[in-house]
Structure formats: structure tokens, C-alpha cells
Amino acid sequence: KLSSPPRSISTRAASGGTARCQQSHIWLTRCAMVRDSDRKERHSGDPKSSVRAPPKKAGGGGKFTLGRLGDESGGGFQDRGDPNFDPDEKRIDPDDGTAYKFDQLAAFYKGKFTKQAIREYWEYECTPVKSKRVAKPKAGLSGPTLAESAAESAKSKYVVKAKPKPEGKRLSPEDMNSDGPLAKEIAAVIPYFPYKKLDKFYDIQGLLRHPKLFNAMCAVMAKRYRKMGVTKLAAFEARGFIFSPVSIKLGVPFVLLRKDGKIPAAISSSPYTKEYEGIDSINVQKGLIVKGDKVVLLDDLVATGGTLCAGIELMKACEAEVVECGCMIELKALNGREKCMKAGAKNVWGFISEDLLTTAAELPDGYVDDGKALSGNRAAKPIPESRAQLGTAPT
């Protein structure tokens, strides 16, 4: 019979419930207003400030701080059981740019913000400092560290030192003179032998045993011809070929003047009598010497001048100008200079005269003059047709 409460009780209960509901709604509304006011206070309208921090002019701790002093209570908190937590780790507080450990940062912000806020600030706002850690040796292990081993191995490495390059002899003005100080020094290392029926056969192999002197000889020639406007250097087979470094120093072509049958497409000189015995001729490859070339003829020695005169005639046949006949040694008594000048050379230059060549070779026991001189009755060869095509003939 009493399936529902009496009307008066229901009415009172309903009216009482409504009152309690209204009171709860008012309380929740007030809480929301408090939270909203707190949120508005903690959010800054300054676009340059952090979401969590009000600007300093509003009483906050700065752009990167977490609020006003006294807003929250609490202290530093970090899970020290976390294997990734390092109590010695330092991070840079963006508010002042200084590196702190977590405990130092938490102690500074203690009482200002909650533990969770401080931890989030540490994790997301502070920048870790990259520190160089030195690995500590484990207890019980002995021996040198890795750094000590590396230093020891560096000491024990064999370092190959480059050999110092030989320094070239510096030329003085006196060294450029014929029979000067350098000429005397070179003459002292050139011995003479009784060879090819000659009492004195000067062996330039002695100079080649002294690279510095040989380089100085080539430097003298290069310095001499640099101002002459030389376009080609032509050297006689075979000892004239040793002066090829002169062309490298000058940067001009080096032309080989060879004997019969040694060069293709050859233009040949007229036969000449050699200073020893026999008759020979000189050849140059066609096209190497052209019209208008200024040529220097190089040889190791000028004696009777027969070889040089043949070379002069060959250059004239190619319509080139012989600027000079340059030789390391000049035997003045044989008058080769006058013959070359008559043949058409503008000048003849000898660096060392025979008077300085006084070094006799030490002959081994049982020495025999085995030089093969050519027979004096060797027949002269006819002038090749290729030279006749040039429209000139030697005199």
C-alpha cells in the first residue's frame, strides 16, 4: 500500500534535492571560475613568452619560468630508480643560460612550482650539456689505458724521412765568365786519357759524376741564351745530347743532330772530316728546323770545328740562323772558332779552355788504347735528294 512516499515527504524530498543540486552547481561553477581565473593568470598574452609563464612585467620569473613566486608549493622530484637518470647530468636553464644539475634546479624552484611542473620543465625546456666523459678503468684490471697505448705506439712508429733535395749551386757574375771560378771547378773533375791515338782525350763522364756541377753548367748555358731570343737548341750526337736540360730550363725545343742512318726523314749535311780520323755527315729530321728559327748549336767540345761547320751548313740549308755555337770545352790551338765564324755562325763560345784541363786520369793496370778510330779512306757519301729539294747546297 505504501508503494510511493507520501506526497508531503516526496515534495519535501524533491524540494530538498533541488536545493542540494543548486548548491552543488553553484560550487562547481565557482571551482570552474577559480580554475579559469588561474588558467588565465598563468597564460600570458605576450607572444614572446612561454605558455606556462607570464612576462616579467606581470610579476613572473621571466620568459621561461613556470609562474609567480608562491603560486605552487612542492619541491624537486625525480625517479632516482630510473636507469636513465644521472644525478651528475647538467642541463641549461633557458631563463639564464646556466647549466645546473636537477637537484640544484629543483632547490631553486622549490616552493614556486609543483614537483611535476619542475620535472616537465627539466625534461622539455632545459637543454642537456654535452660533456666529454673519460672512461674509468674497471677495478681489478691492470695495464696501460687506451690513451697511453696509443701514445706509445705513436712513439714506436718508424717515420720515413724524405731525403733532402740537392741544392743547386747559386751562380755569381764571375761564374758566368769563361775560365772563371766555376769553369775551374768543373775542369778539375774532367780527366784526360790517352785514347783514339790522342795524348789527351777529355772524358766528360767525370762531370756527370757531380750532379751539382753538371746542373750549374746547364744553368750557365740557359742564363746565357735566355736573352738571345733562341727558338731551338740543336745538339750533336752523342755527347752534345747531355745538354738537353738546357732546353728544359729555357722552355724551347731540343733538336737531335744525328749521324747517317740514325733518323727517319733526314736532311743530310755534306761530308766532313772529323777531328780524330774519318769522314762523316750530320742529319736532321725534316720539319724540325724551319725558316726564321734562331738556333744554338751545342756540343761538348770544339776542336777543328768540322762537326760544327757541318751543322752550320745544315741550318743554313733549312733557312735558319745560327745565333751561336756553344761548347763546354774549347781547344783554341786548333782554330775551330775561326772556321765556324767563316761558315756563318754569329759567335762561338767556349766555357773552359784547354789550359785548365790538367787532371790526368788514373789508368788501371794493363790499360790499352782500344778506341776504334775510323779509317781515313772512308768514301764520302753523295748528298741525299731530300736536301736538293730545299733548293740549297752546302759549300
Image (tube, rainbow, N blue to C red):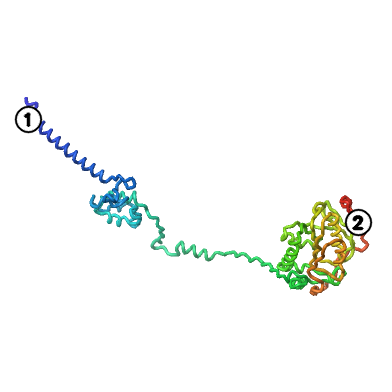
C-alpha span from label 1 to label 2: 158 Å
Above or below 365: residue 82 = above
Decide if residue 91 is in sight here.
no
Residue 41 in sight from this viewpoint: yes
Quarter of the image that includes the C terminus: bottom right
Could you tell me which residue is drawn at 30 percent across and 53 percent down? Answer: 80
Mark 1 residue element: helix
How many badges with numbers are in the image? 2
In percent of the image, x 10 and y 33: which residue is there? 16
324 displayed left or right of 61: right
- Residue where numbered disc 1 is placed: 9
The answer to whether 160 appears left or right of 120 in the picture is: right
Q: Which residue is mark 2?
A: 381
Above or below for 319 versus 336: above
Q: Quadrant of residue 316?
A: bottom right
Depth order, front residue of 244/390: 390
User: Which residue is more in the foreground, 38 or 241?
Assistant: 38
Q: Secondary structure at mark 2?
A: loop
At label 1, the amino acid type is Ile
